Amino acid sequence: MTDTAELQRRTAQLLADHPPATTGRLDFLKARFDAGLAWVHYPEGLGGLGAPRSLQAVVDAELEAAGAPDNDPRRIGIGLGMAAPTILKYGTDEQKQRFLRPLWTGEEVWCQLFSEPGAGSDLAALGTRAVREDGGDWIVNGQKVWTSSAHVARWAILIARTDPDVPKHAGITYFLCDMTDPGVEVRPLRQITGEAEFNEVFLTGVRIPDTRRLGEVGAGWRVAQTTLNNERVAIGGMRLPREGGMIGPVARTWRERPELRTHDLHQRLLKLWVEAEVARLTGERLRQQLASGQPGPEGAGMKLAFARLNQEISGLEVELRGEEGLLYDDWTMRRPELVDFTGRDAGYRYLRSKGNSIEGGTSEVLLNIVAERVLGLPSEPRTDKDVAWKDLAR
C-alpha cells in the first residue's frame, strides 16, 4: 500500500540518487518517471505507482522544496491533460510504453487535431477522411483548424471519418499522428493578439499505420469524449494559489495604485474576487473527485466559469487602468510555445481572454452539456441522429 510516508521515502531516494544540482534536467525527469513519481495514480511502469491521485501533492511538495526541475507543464499541457489520459485508457500496452514517458518528460510535444473549418461546435460533423489500404495503413486527407502548438508538436491526437455511410457519431476513428510525416502541413493563424499560437493543419495523403489507431474502428467519438472531458478539466480546473490567474494582476494594481480606485470598481472587484476564489476551490474539489475515476461532464461547468471570469476580470482591469488599459505592448507576429496570461500587459489579457469561450468547447455547447448531462434536462431535438453522414446537408 502506497501512503504518504512511502512516497516521501521514494522521493528522498530519488533525490539522493539523482541530486538536482548535479543531474541534468532531462535525466532527472526520466529518473522521476521511472521511479513512479511522475503521476503517482498511473500504473507501475508507466510513471506511477497505482497510488491515490491526491498523493501527487506530497511528491510535488518534496521535489519543489529540493529545487528539482519540473516538466514545464504549461508547454506540454495538451499532452499531459488530453493525450496521456486517453492513451492510458484506450491504448495498447505497446502504445503506452512508447508514448507516455517522452510525453511526460516533454521530449515530445503533442497537439490536438479535432476541430475543422466546418466542424467546430458540431465536432462530430468532421469531414477529414481516413481510408484503409489493403496493407492495413490508413490514408488521411483533410484540414484541421485552431490547433495549438502544432508548430512545435511531434505528435497529434487525431479524429477522422472512416465510415461516411453511418450517422456522424458512429463513423469516426481515433488516431495518433506523427506531425513529421510527409503530407502534414502546418500554417500559422494570426490572432487578435498579434500572435499565432495556434494553426491550421492540412493533411494530404498522410499515411498512418493501424498500430497507431487508438480504440476500435468506428469508436472514435467515444474515445474522444475521454479527451474532451479531460481537456475541460485541464483548462478550467487547473491548480492555482489564492489570487492566482487573472485576478492576481487586478488585485495587485488595486493595492498599488490607490489613485485609480472608484466605489463602483471596488464593488465589482470584490464580486469577481469572491467568484474567482469560489471557482478555485471548486476546481480543487473537482480534482479530488477525480481520484475515484475519470472526469465527467462536471468539467464543462468549470470551463464555463473559467471563460466567463477571465473575460469579466480582464475587462475590469482595462477599465481600472484607464488610458493605460488602452495601450498594447507588442503586436509583433510570434509563434509562442505557450499562453502566458499573466506575463503580458492588461491589453493582452483582455484580447486573449476572448478566445476562452471558444477554445476547448464553446460556452454555448458547454451550457448544453451541463443542462443535459449534469442537470438531467431534456436534450435539444436532433434531426440528424439517424442520418448517414454523407447525406447531411453541408
Image: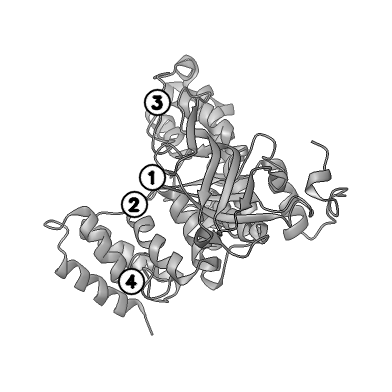
Q: Earlier in the sequence, mark 3 or mark 2?
A: 2
Q: Earlier in the sequence, mark 4 or mark 2?
A: 4
**Helix, strand, or loop for circle 2?**
loop
**Helix, strand, or loop for circle 3?**
loop
Please state if 89 lies on the left or on the right of 69 as rendered.
right
**Residue 36 badge:** 4
Dot 3 crowding, Cα within 10 Å, few <14, some 14–19, many 20+: some
Q: Are marks 4 and 2 in contact (CB under 8 Å)?
A: no
Q: Amino acid at mark 3?
A: Arg
Where in the figure is residue 312, as x and y percent of width and height?
Answer: 59, 34
The N terminus: image quadrant: bottom left
Q: Name the residue beneath numbered marker 2.
A: 106
How many numbered marks are there? 4
Front residue (pair 386, 62) = 386
Q: Amino acid at mark 4?
A: Gly
Q: Earlier in the sequence, mark 1 or mark 3?
A: 1
Front residue (pair 78, 113) = 113
Q: Amino acid at mark 2?
A: Gly
Q: Earlier in the sequence, mark 2 or mark 1?
A: 1
Q: Name the residue beneath numbered marker 1.
A: 75
